[in-house]
Image (cartoon, rainbow, N blue to C red):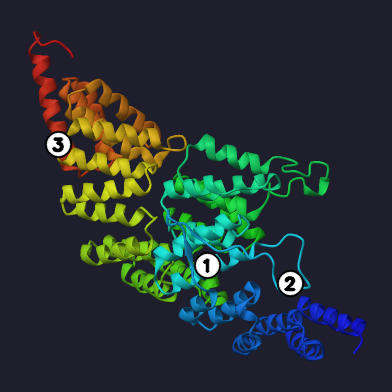
Amino acid sequence: MREEVVEKLRGVVRDCVSKHLYSSAIFFADKVAAFTNDPADIYMQAQALFLGRHFRRAFHLLNASKIVLHDLRFRYLAAKCLEELKEWDQCLLMLGDPKVDEQRNAYETKDDNFLYPDKDGEDREINISSAVCFLRGKAYEALENRAQARLWYKAAVKADPLCYEALERLVDNHMLTSEEENNLLSTIQFGPEYEWLSTFYSCLTKKYEKENVVEGMFRELEKEGYAYSHSDPSFAHTLKNNTDLLARKAEYYHQCGEYQKCFELTSMLLEKDPFHMKCTLVHIAAATELSHSNELYLMACNLVKDYPQKALSWFAVGCYYYCIKKYDQSRRYFSKATNLDGTFPPAWIGYGNAYAAQEEGDQAMAAYRTAARLFPGCHLPALYIGMEYMRTHSFKLAEQFFMQAKSICPSDPLIYNELGVVAYHIKEYNRAVWWFEKTLAHIPSTLSEIWEPTVVNLAHAYRKLKMFNEAIQNYEKALTLSTQSVSTYAGLAYTYHLQDNFTSAITYYHKALWLKPDDQFCTEMLSSALVDECHREVDPKLEYC
């Protein structure tokens, strides 16, 4: 057959693939390979079979050609077939022996001189070595060897920064600590045309940086005419309204405790792209924090209908029941989410929290420990284990786990708050003050109502140290954040009482009792303050403090 006819048939195969007519692609690719017996055409036939989900047949074709032993592209496609067949050990054997240097950094030997290059190759391809490293990481993760999986995902990103899936796995599955994420980004070599990608990756990993740092990165990505194509007006504003970028911004708001702001942004994004999974997860988390049970119910119904096999769908159902305080049903659906996807961190955390809400500490600890084992880069399991120990007054054990959480993520202010609470309980008030002040220093955004308990805790610690003026300043600061806290009014009243300022003490005891009329402490102390005030009025020698 003439070469121009064969080339035309190759074009037909490519067109069938682009139109998702895979059976047609397989038919014509098979005929082209029969006519030419060219390894490149055999590779094209194997690709058509793979896209048509004939994985076993595609693997047999590649393996029978023997070229698989010499060409990395053939080997990679054969390994992809084994991945789809869930034959992970065979997949690793097909990829060949791994290479690890003296610093325990994994790498894949460069193999750019393919014996039989793809005739439909593009100008800029993802480095095949990076793809091989990523597939090796997926195989190790499926075999529950997460240490090796982490090694090869890092190797994939280093081999080619455009291999986003590898970084996504590392970040979403919490395989690296904050320090390790920063170290990895510092080693990646971005070309001048991909400076925007470097900033985007930084937005993914810098979870607890100061507000001005993160907002600066977002502004840099959003600014008009960003990147190398300033002269091309079609490129302007392309990232300003990008859903991925805005979803990341919503996630940052959630981590800062600005749940209403986060919820409003995710609601807007889901109107634009209702099936964006990462945005959906953040939206569910924000709705749970805000107790928007109706929104959770609607989200859960839609997700279960559209994605019954996704862990996120049943996680949403669990969040709904958690929100309405039906913790038994909540646990059932969180458990179902973990069964569908054992590497879905929110489901494990929710599962533990549902037990903790009913003070079933042993089961909660078991869930948190599983999460800590599966997600070594996530500090939340260690933090929650510490909280459970603190609930049972095991303060030394609690402190150990809080310090472990701090080693994983040293920039989360909640950790420092819990360490301050531990120090307060064991009556080390100077240390408690130090930890609470460190908490306020690490808060990435401006103080909001969510941090009101920390300010109150700091005031309590100052009161215990008899530093009454500092205590009063912090109680008043807490009142600017929330005017509905009984403990703030009671603490402020008691501090004034200790200063013998009975008039102010009586005023604030009344305010506390207005919020909670049956508060025993405030009732008793109000009576005491009234008696003390009467005694002072009787004795003119007493000076007003």
Identify the residue at image location x=51%, y=70%.
Answer: 136
To which quarter of the image does residue 341 belong? bottom left
Q: What's the amino acid at mark 3?
A: Lys
User: Is residue 364 depicted above or below 199 in this figure?
Assistant: below
Marks 3 and 2, how far apart in space?
A: 71 Å
Please give the label number shown on residue 298: 1
Q: Is residue 314 visible?
A: no
Nearer-N-terminus badge (3/1) = 1
User: Is residue 444 depicted above or below 405 in this figure?
Assistant: above
Q: What's the amino acid at mark 1?
A: Leu
Q: Position of residue 412 (x, y in %)?
A: 38, 44
Q: Position of residue 153 (x, y in %)?
A: 50, 61
Q: Element type at marker 3?
A: loop
Looking at the picture, tell me which residue is in the foreground, 303 or 490.
303
Looking at the picture, tell me which residue is in the foreground, 173 or 323.
173
Say which residue label 2 marks.
117
Marks 3 and 1, how far apart in space?
A: 47 Å
